Amino acid sequence: MFKPKTDRIKQIAGKFPHKIEELEKIFSRATNIYIDYANVRPWANKLKWHIDLKRLKQLFESFETIRAIKIYNGTLTGDKYSKDFNQNLNRLGYELKTKPVKIMRKYIDVSSIPMNSSVILENFIRKPLLQKLKIETIEYLNLRLQELNKQKILYLEDKKCNFDVEIGRDILIDCDKNNTETFILWSGDSDFADPIEQLLKDGKKVYLFATVKRVATELNDLREKGLVIYDIQKIKEFICWRKETTC
């Protein structure tokens, strides 16, 4: 049953009752929600609007059947913004799962290789594409790296914090022990294909909340087995930044 958490949600629901009816059908049984935030955050580039996590939580809390809202996000050690952001997630009432972000160094020192070698570029460009590039292109790219080396830039830092294992584990535990009937996953990552397929085999309802063009092929293929992909643009007015809403 839908009971608007705030007057604002009640007001928007009055303008878009069909969207609430659709969500009520999705959340008709005991429901858990899992948000892979590192995967979700970049969607704003495609959507041209941003998800407000406070408004998102308020919308979820307006449905009585939602039992848990779990969000997975890394912590960048020593970074105040990262620490404050995760603390805010806790204040909002999310079940936060976090771990340190790994900083991976990728070296770009080309001083000891021929300019036509792709050995450094292989760290950044997959081999099938490299094999299609002309030697002139490889030489050009290495020359650009050489310019960075002259500026004493010998490596780049890449941040990595993957929660696929943790999310997959939590989903299957909730399936086995917590009597969850409906699973809502906010992600488009192909790594979730196996746990989703297992849920469907177990007779569970599984919804992928995503922007349609950011869903991996492996997940799209599971629609034949019962996975439902819900385009989050349908609920933009409920969950986007206030300055980006039209109502």
Image (cartoon, rainbow, N blue to C red):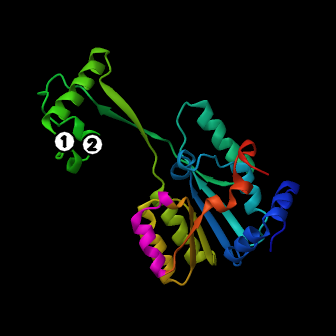
The picture quadrant where one finds residue 159 is top left
The relative height of residue 181 versus residue 247 in the rendered view (above or below) is: below
Secondary structure that dominates the magenta span: helix
What percent of the width, then of the height, locates residue 217? 40, 65
Residue 218 part of the magenta segment: yes
Tell me the quarter of the picture where residue 102 sits.
top left
Q: Determine the CA span between mark 2 and mark 1.
A: 11 Å
Q: For residue 187, which numbered disc appears in the image?
A: none
- Label 1, on which residue? 133
Q: Furthest-right residue in view?
A: 7
Q: Identify which residue is drawn at 17% across, 37% down.
A: 118
Q: Are marks 2 and 1 in contact (CB under 8 Å)?
A: yes
Look at mark 2 in the image and give the residue it sits on. 125
Q: State the residue at coordinates (31%, 34%).
A: 106
Single out the mark in the foreground, 2 or 1: 1
Other-residue count near label 1 (Cα within 10 Å), few / some / many at <14 / 14–19 / ≥20: few
| Residue range of the region highlighted in magenta in the rendering | 213-225
Q: Earlier in the sequence, mark 2 or mark 1?
A: 2
Q: For numbered disc 1, what is the local secondary structure?
A: loop
Horizontal side of 217 relative to 61 (left or right) equals left
Look at label 2 and name its amino acid.
Answer: Ile
Residue 159 to residue 222: above or below:
above
Residue at image location 68% in from the left, 47% down from the top: 89
The x and y percentages for residue 213 are: 48, 58
Does the magenta portion include 173? no
